[in-house]
Image (cartoon, rainbow, N blue to C red):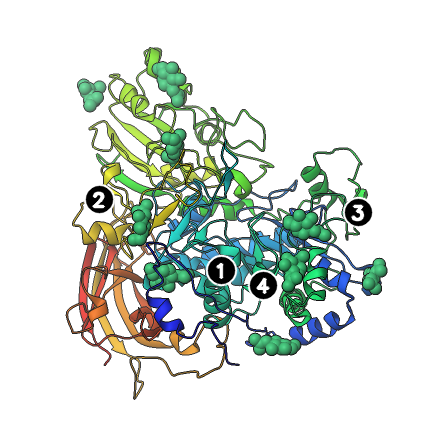
């Protein structure tokens, strides 16, 4: 199938779309039709024959949301036995439900660097969504990627490194969908800040447009698109377009990102769903590649507000601005994953009424009245418990995602101290109920917004430590204001060890304004450590990711653990680390700097401007975010990307580097001509072209797991002009492998597979991935700055 750009010279436009100092996006029509290629062929035929039975009104129902029990609702069509589609938040729990688990956040999951745990988490989450009768879970997240340290939703995603995030997306999606739920990779694309993420109307009635992420083509491909490519490769059912603009065009009506990149270059066969309220046009959004408009509604004859879609689509089809075949393609894209995952099965669970009640704020046996039919369960099977013993997995995830940053004077692990003191408002149970993540008092197990969870149970650190040491003296002061104003002089006897629990909140809808932990954290640590009672202080943080730790070098801060957002087993997870039931193996999936100014790519903020187009975020740093920026500008981080201590030590040896025998490896993957590639893009990009092995040995005295990491240095001085050292990072992560627990003295061989895409850069002129000439540096180590084995490889 040949796709034509309406412009005569699309290549030229793709390279230089700056017009009069404005970023623009080229038009790319028409949207390719789905074919179900790549394994969905049978489901596609089912979707096609079903579509043929629909009348026009019913077709409109399938693409536009209505009011209903779930966060997003496609109503049932009883005439045809179709039970509707229920979309639910995501991504760390089924949010609107009782008796469901609250899992560790995305950032925690990345911190494990453990593919198997990522997979187990995805499967468990998927199972809970299915159990509650959802069809689509709104997650996982790879946008935001984490360009700005202060991004309010970074924690919902995984890591600012696209390779690590890509692996996490792949594992999560394949695992979730193996349980029968549709995953939704979100938010596509360039959604890197909350501030002005949606348009606003100022006091003069002027509409101020949403922030525009202006991203050059290479940066888009090598950073922000990379994990979405892995998601499509994983067979993701849907992709959510984001609130922001890209090159000044809204993400849900951007033909370049949707029609060209997602549906053609990546061969995506599923559907694009709008973020809630992110649709800003009718005909345009349809022709540019949006397939489902959420939350709708249908329009004039519906009781609620009108929308761009709904019954308006009838007019669009009648007046010829949208061909009916386009609407059919949208429906087929929506229904193909539904049939593929057998969600039409008679045994697929009904929608638990608890969801309807929580969404509408009603209780008892009342069910809200809806205008359209849904496959709701009954009052006798509501509040279904779908947790299925997942708390032990959540505990394990919380433990595996705790990073030991400092451990001096052999403070950790704790033996069996008789005298402990706990400080900080993060140590205790939450005081604001199960569904209020922003409490002054209470362990910060999750963040806020649509990505939060409803805690059916929560274990606080204080509770877990008391259970662990039933006869110790355990003193605690958990009011931070009291600590900073009055000190801790009431503590007696002097503790053997002091634990300070700090927390940081983050939520959808707002970016963070500080990188410090909240609630006077610095003063709290200083008060405790200078009190004369706490020369042995362990600081534990629960946080959405990046924090500055200005007290890290304090002589009395003898250990630091970053425990992220562990989910409902927070207390048990941290005690498992403190007492070495589990030897820590978490590694930072981001960089911790000495000072805020060390980070680049700040949140842009034009609050107060009355220029409708003021909000421009130029991604001029290109590929240099997080560790790439620190490496490129020779900035020393406090704790680098990939870093994390263990109670033992490991040593690396015996690097092996071999090319996979391919007689003729060309710089470019085989040309597909006019074909739309299979999901994920040109299949050759995923061919393994080299294998690197290394041996890792536990050189200490405690059993533990290690995470060897492989970084690649691209050849920047071998004649490839696009690969200059000013635009190309010094090194990029291209492999990692968490080992089994190794006994002292034991070794394991780790194996990293380099795929064609891993050793290619995005060549803008050719619009393809190219393996450069010259010699790549292979760097194997235990963090991005602890490289102990090196080698070289070249392909051409
Ligand atoms: C973004 O880049 C454009 C084009 O170079 C420039 O005109 C504009 O001033 C920049 N905006 C900001 C906020 O830097
Ligand atoms: C945005 O503009 C840049 C050039 O400044 C270009 O490289 C890129 O392809 C454009 N992206 C989109 C989605 O139009
Ligand atoms: C999609 O299919 C319809 C027929 O169903 C056809 O008219 C249209 O040209 C196709 N679009 C593309 C881009 O091939
Ligand atoms: C389409 O089918 C629905 C029943 O699913 C019916 O209510 C409606 O009247 C039909 N519309 C047309 C235009 O036939
Ligand atoms: C069509 O869309 C416009 C814009 O949202 C809205 O004002 C109008 O009411 C819609 N019409 C129908 C029939 O829904
Ligand atoms: C067709 O109808 C749609 C929806 O009402 C409208 O937005 C569009 O401008 C119309 N196009 C033409 C060519 O009349
Ligand atoms: C943006 O600027 C406004 C006004 O100065 C300020 O109130 C707000 O906190 C800023 N937002 C962020 C995320 O820094
Ligand atoms: C910081 O401490 C002061 C008193 O020591 C208190 O008044 C203030 O509310 C505290 N701020 C926060 C955010 O806890
Ligand atoms: C550390 O604790 C000791 C003993 O309590 C005290 O003398 C010293 O001043 C403390 N250091 C700091 C930096 O507070």
Which of the two marks, 1 or 3, is nearer to us in this view? 1
Q: Which residue extends farthest bottom?
A: 663
Q: CA distance from mark 4 to mark 1?
A: 31 Å
Q: Is residue 280 visible?
A: yes
* Quarter of the rendered structure image containing ligand 3: bottom right
Would you say the residues marked 4 and 3 are in contact, meaning their CB atoms lie under 8 Å apart?
Answer: no
Lower position in the chain sequence, tag 4 or tag 3: 4
Please report whichever mark, 4 or 2, sits nearer to the chain's N-terminal start.
4
Q: Would you identify the image quadrant in which residue 193 lies?
A: top left
Image coordinates of residue 359 in percent, x first then y, are 67, 39
Q: Which mark is residue 240?
A: none
Q: Quadrant of residue 412?
A: top left
Residue placed under numbered mark 2 in the picture: 637
- C-alpha span from label 4 to label 2: 40 Å
Q: Which residue is mark 3?
A: 371
Residue that carries the numbered disc 4 in the rendered image:
178
For label 3, the SS is: loop
Residue drawn at the location 53% of the way across and 81% of the way down: 1
Q: Label 1: which residue?
A: 254
| Label 4 crowd bin: few (<14), some (14–19), many (20+), radius 10 Å | some
From the top left corner, tell me how far across and down residue 475 is, in percent.
Answer: 40, 19
Classify mark 3: residues with Cα within 10 Å, few (<14), some (14-19) or many (20+).
Answer: few
Mark pair 2, 1: CA separation: 38 Å
How far separated are the C-alphas under marks 1 and 3?
33 Å
N-terminal-most mark, 2 or 1: 1
């Amino acid at each position: 199938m040949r796709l034509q750009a309406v412009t005569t010279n699309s290549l030229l436009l793709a390279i230089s779309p700056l017009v009069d100092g404005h970023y623009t996006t080229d038009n790319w029509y028409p949207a390719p039709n789905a074919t179900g290629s790549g394994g969905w062929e049978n489901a596609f035929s089912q979707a096609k024959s079903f579509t043929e039975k629909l009348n026009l009104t019913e077709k409109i129902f399938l693409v536009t949301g209505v009011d209903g029990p779930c966060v997003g609702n496609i109503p049932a069509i009883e005439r045809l036995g179709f039970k509707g589609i229920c979309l639910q938040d995501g991504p760390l729990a089924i949010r609107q439900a009782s008796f469901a688990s609250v899992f560790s956040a995305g950032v925690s999951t990345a911190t494990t660097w453990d593919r198997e745990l990522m997979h187990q988490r995805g499967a468990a989450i998927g199972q809970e969504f299915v159990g509650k009768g959802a069809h689509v879970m709104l997650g996982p997240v790879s946008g935001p990627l984490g360009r700005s340290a202060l991004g309010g939703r970074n924690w919902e995603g995984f890591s600012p490194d696209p390779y690590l995030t890509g692996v996490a997306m792949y594992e999560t999606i394949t695992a979730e969908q193996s349980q029968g739920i549709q995953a939704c990779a979100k938010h596509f694309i360039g959604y890197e800040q909350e501030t002005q993420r949606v348009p606003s109307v100022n006091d003069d009635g002027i509409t101020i447009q949403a922030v525009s992420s202006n991203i050059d083509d290479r940066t888009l491909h090598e950073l922000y698109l990379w994990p979405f490519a892995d998601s499509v490769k994983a067979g993701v059912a849907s992709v959510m377009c984001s609130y922001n603009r890209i090159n000044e065009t809204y993400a849900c009506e951007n033909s370049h990102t949707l029609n060209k990149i997602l549906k053609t270059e990546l061969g995506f066969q599923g559907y694009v769903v709008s973020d809630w309220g992110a649709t800003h046009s009718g005909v345009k959004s349809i022709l540019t590649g949006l397939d489902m408009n959420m939350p709708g509604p249908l329009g004039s004859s519906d009781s609620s507000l009108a929308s761009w879609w709904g019954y308006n689509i009838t007019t669009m089809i009648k007046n010829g601005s949208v061909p009916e075949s386009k609407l059919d393609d949208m429906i087929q894209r929506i229904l193909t994953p539904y049939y593929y995952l057998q969600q039409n099965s008679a045994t697929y669970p009904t929608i638990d009424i608890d969801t309807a009640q929580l969404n509408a704020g009603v209780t008892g046996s009342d069910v809200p009245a809806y205008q359209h039919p849904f496959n709701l369960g009954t009052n006798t099977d509501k509040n279904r418990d779908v947790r299925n013993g997942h708390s032990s997995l959540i505990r394990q995830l919380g433990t595996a995602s705790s990073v030991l940053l400092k451990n001096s004077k052999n403070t950790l692990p704790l033996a069996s101290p008789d005298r402990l003191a706990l400080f900080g408002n993060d140590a205790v149970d939450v005081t604001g109920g199960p569904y209020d993540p922003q409490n002054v008092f209470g362990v910060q197990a999750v963040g806020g917004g649509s990505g939060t969870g409803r805690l059916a149970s929560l274990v606080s650190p204080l509770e877990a430590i008391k259970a662990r040491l039933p006869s110790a003296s355990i003193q605690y002061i958990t009011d931070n204001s009291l600590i900073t104003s009055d000190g801790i002089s009431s503590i007696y006897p002097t503790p053997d060890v002091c634990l300070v629990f700090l927390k940081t909140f983050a939520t959808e809808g707002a970016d963070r304004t500080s990188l410090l932990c909240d609630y006077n954290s610095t003063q709290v640590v200083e008060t405790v450590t200078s009190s004369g009672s706490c020369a042995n202080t362990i600081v534990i943080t629960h946080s959405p990711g990046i924090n500055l730790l200005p007290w890290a070098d304090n002589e009395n801060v003898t250990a630091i653990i970053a425990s992220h957002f562990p989910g409902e087993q927070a207390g048990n997870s941290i005690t498992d680390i403190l007492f070495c039931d589990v030897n820590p193996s978490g590694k930072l999936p981001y960089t911790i700097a000495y000072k805020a100014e060390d980070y680049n790519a700040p949140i842009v903020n034009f609050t107060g401007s009355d220029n409708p187009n003021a909000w421009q975020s130029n991604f001029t740093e290109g590929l240099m975010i997080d560790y790439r920026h620190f490496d490129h500008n020779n900035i020393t981080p406090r704790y680098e990307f990939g870093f994390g201590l263990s109670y033992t030590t490991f040593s690396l040896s015996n690097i092996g580097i071999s090319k996979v025998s391919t007689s003729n490896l060309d710089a470019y993957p085989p040309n597909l001509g006019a074909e739309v590639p299979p999901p994920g893009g040109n299949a050759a990009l995923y061919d393994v072209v080299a294998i690197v092995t290394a041996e890792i040995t536990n050189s200490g005295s405690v059993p533990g797991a290690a995470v060897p990491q492989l970084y690649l240095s691209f050849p920047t001085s071998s004649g490839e002009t696009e690969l200059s050292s000013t635009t190309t990072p010094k090194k990029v992560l291209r492999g990692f492998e968490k080992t089994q627990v190794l006994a002292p003295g034991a070794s394991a061989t780790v194996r990293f597979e380099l795929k064609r895409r891993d050793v290619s850069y995005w060549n803008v002129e050719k619009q393809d991935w190219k393996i450069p000439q010259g010699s790549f540096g292979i760097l194997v180590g235990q963090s991005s700055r602890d490289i102990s084995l090196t080698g070289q490889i070249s392909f051409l």
